[in-house]
Amino acid sequence: MASIMVVTETAGERTPLLRDSEPEYSRGGTEYSSPPSAEEPPPRDSNDSKQRLVSLDVLRGLTVALMILVDDAGKAFPSINHAPWLGVTLADFVMPFFLFGVGVSVSLVFKKVTSRLAATKKVILRSIKLFLLGVILQGGYFHGRGNLTYGVDVEKIRVMGVLQRIAIGYLLASALEIWLVKNTVVNSAVAFVKRYSFQIGAGILLGLLYMVLLYGLYVPNWAFDVSSLNVVSPTSLGASTQTVSCGLRGSLDPPCNAVGFIDRTLLGEKHLYQRPVYRRTKECSVNSPDYGPLPPNSPAWCLAPFDPEGILSSLMAAITCLVGLHYGHLSVHCKSQMQRVIFWFISSLPLLISGYLLSVLGIPYSKPLYTLSYMFITAGASGVLLTVIYLLVDVKSIRKPTAIFQWMGMNALIVYALSACDIFPAALQGFYWRSPENNLVDFSERLLQSLFHSEKWGTLAFVLLEILFWGAVAGVLHMKRIYIKF
C-alpha cells in the first residue's frame, strides 16, 4: 500500500504525504515548481514565485511532533490533552493543522492535469488506500504501548479515525480542485473569487448541510449494551443494557447530539471509538479533566461509545481542507513572497474573528463535534501558523532551527504510523527482561522520572526525547533521500 521512493540527485522533488510525484493540472496562472534539494535556500528575489514551500513541510512535521507531545504527555498534563467536550486546548489544533496542510498541498499538486479522469482515479485510489491504512492502524488491531497483544474482533473494529478523516478531506478537496475551478485569468481580487467560486459555494453548502443536520435532526432515545463494548467495568452502572433519554433536536451535549446519532445509526455502536473524551468530564470522572473512576450517580451515557472522527463531523472537517486550498491558491497567484504573507495574514483574521463571535453567540468550540466556531478558530490559527513559518523559513531563510520539523514533514506518514500509533514503542516493548514491565521504553521513562524527581516532568522529558529521536530518524531518511509515499 505504501511505497518507498529513493530520490537521486537528478530525480527531482520528493513526494510528501498526500502529494503526487508531479503536478498534473494546468489552468493558467503562476507555475509552482521546486528545487532539486530541499536544503537549498530559496532565491532572494522577492518576485520568484516558483520556489518550493519548505514551510509546508515544516508545518506538517510540527503537527506530527505536536501530536506525539499531546498524546504521550497528555496523561501527565491533562491541560494540553483534548478538551473533555467543550472548549479548545493545544491537542485540539492537531487535526485542523493536518487538514489545512492537506488542502494547501492539493492546490499545489493539481495545477497540471493532462486528464481529469486519470487524476480523479488516482485520487480515489489514494483515498481508499489511506482510509484502509487508517482502519488497520486505528481500528483496534494494534493494541499499542502497554499491551503486547494484537488482533481485533471484526464485529468491533473501529471504522473511522484520523487517517480516515484525512482521506475524506483529501478526496473532497482534490475533486473540487480538479473539476470545479474556472479558467478565469486572475488579474484582480474579483477574478480570483470568480475563478474559485464553485469551491467557495461547495464549502458553504457543506457547512449548511452540517448545521441543518446538527441542529435539525431529531435524536430519539437509545440504548446500548455495555457488556458488548470494550470498557473496563461493564457492570459499574448496574444493568448491562443502558438507556439514554433524548427525544430532542439541537443538543450539543455528549449523549444526544446528531453527530453521535448518525454514527450509531450508520456504523453501529460497536464500530465507534470506545474511550471518548467525555469520559473525562466531571459527570464521568472523579479525576476530571483526566480519566478516572465513575463518580456516584454518574449518567448512563458515560460508558457509551462516541467517535471523535465521525461521519457528520468529517463534513465540517473537510471545510478546513478547503480553507487550505484557498491559502494554496494565494500562494500560486501572488507574485512576491511578501504578498503571500500579507494575503495569508489578512485571510486568517476573518476566520479567527468569526470563530470567536460564533462562540460568543452560543456555538461553542467542540473538537468531537467539529462545530462551526471550532472550524473557524482552528483554520484561522492554521493560517497564522503557516504565515509565521513561511516568513521565517522561506522569506528569511532561517532553516536550521526548524530542520527537525522539516525532516519529519518529509516523512510524516511513517513517523505518524510508527510513533503516534504506538507501533514502534509496542514492538520495542516486546523485548523485556523476565517481566513485560522491564522493557527499554518503560525503563527509560521511569529513569527520567527518577532523575527529575517528578512523574510529570520526567514524562515530558521522555516525550521530548521521543520527538528528537523521530526527528533524527527522519533526518537520516532525508540524508539518504528516502521518502515514504502513499
Image (cartoon, grey):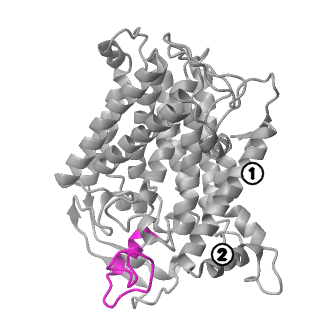
Amino acid identity at mark 1: Val
User: Measuring 78% from the left and 86% from the top, which residue is drawn there?
Assistant: 435
- Disc on the earlier residue, 1 or 2: 2
Is 186 drawn above or below residue 154 in the view shown? above
Q: Please, what secondary structure does the residue beneath circle 1 have?
A: helix
The C terminus, quarter of image: top right
The N terminus, quarter of image: top right
The magenta-colored residue range is: 276-301
User: Measuring 53% from the left and 53% from the top, which residue is drawn there?
Assistant: 162
The location of residue 267, given as percent across then percent down, is: 47, 59
Classify residue 173 as left or right of residue 430. Answer: left
> Residue 329, labelled with which disc?
none
Report which quarter residue 306 is drawn in. bottom left
User: Measuring 37% from the left and 45% from the top, which residue is drawn there?
Assistant: 316
> Residue 473, labelled with which disc?
1
Q: Which residue is mark 2?
A: 448
The location of residue 301, given as percent across then percent down, is: 35, 76
User: What is the C-alpha distance between the residues marked 1 and 2?
Assistant: 22 Å
Q: Is residue 84 visible?
A: yes
Q: Main secondary structure of the magenta part?
A: loop
The location of residue 396, given as percent across then percent down, is: 53, 29
* Magenta residue check for 287: yes
The location of residue 16, given as percent across then percent down, is: 65, 36
Q: Is residue 154 visible?
A: no
Q: Nearer the viewer, residue 143 or 145?
A: 145
Amino acid identity at mark 2: Leu
The extreme left residue here reads: 361
Q: Nearer the viewer, residue 324 or 404?
A: 404
Q: Nearer the viewer, residue 77 or 209?
A: 77
Q: Please, what secondary structure does the residue beneath circle 2 have?
A: helix
Q: Are marks 1 and 2 in contact (CB under 8 Å)?
A: no
